[in-house]
Image: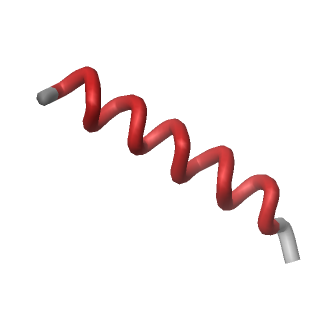
């Protein structure tokens, strides 16, 4: 399982959404 990789993707998505708002 690549939990670290999944977490990185989540953080990236979060940052993107934050910048969009």
Position of 7 relative to 1 (above/below)? above
Please, which residue is most extreme toward the top here?
19
Q: Which residue shows up at 66% across the image and 55% down it?
A: 7
Residue 17 as seen in the image, left or right of residue 14: left
- Residue at 76 percent across and 54 percent down: it is 5
Q: How is the image coloured?
A: secondary structure
Asked if residue 8 lies left or right of residue 19, the reply is: right
Quadrant of the image for the N terminus?
A: bottom right
* Residue at the far left in the pictured view: 21
Q: Position of residue 10 (x, y in %)?
A: 53, 52
Quadrant in which the C terminus appears: top left
Number of marks present in the image shown: 0
Please identify the quarter of the rendering in which residue 15 is found. top left
Q: Position of residue 20 (x, y in %)?
A: 18, 26
Residue 14: x and y in percent read 40, 42
**Residue lying farthest to the bottom in this orientation:** 1
Asked if residue 2 is positioned above or below residue 14 in the image, the reply reads: below
5 versus 13 height, above or below: below
Q: Residue furthest right?
A: 1
Q: Tell me which corner region of the image, top left, top right, bottom left or bottom right, holds residue 16.
A: top left
Q: Describe residue 7's horizontal placement relative to residue 5 as left or right.
A: left
Q: Residue at x 67, y 60 (%)?
A: 6
18 is higher (above) or lower (below) than 7: above
Q: In which quadrant of the rendered view does residue 17 lie?
A: top left
Q: Is residue 2 left or right of residue 8?
A: right
């Amino acid at each position: 399982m690549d939990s670290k990789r999944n977490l990185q993707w989540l953080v990236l998505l979060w940052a993107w959404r934050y910048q969009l708002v």
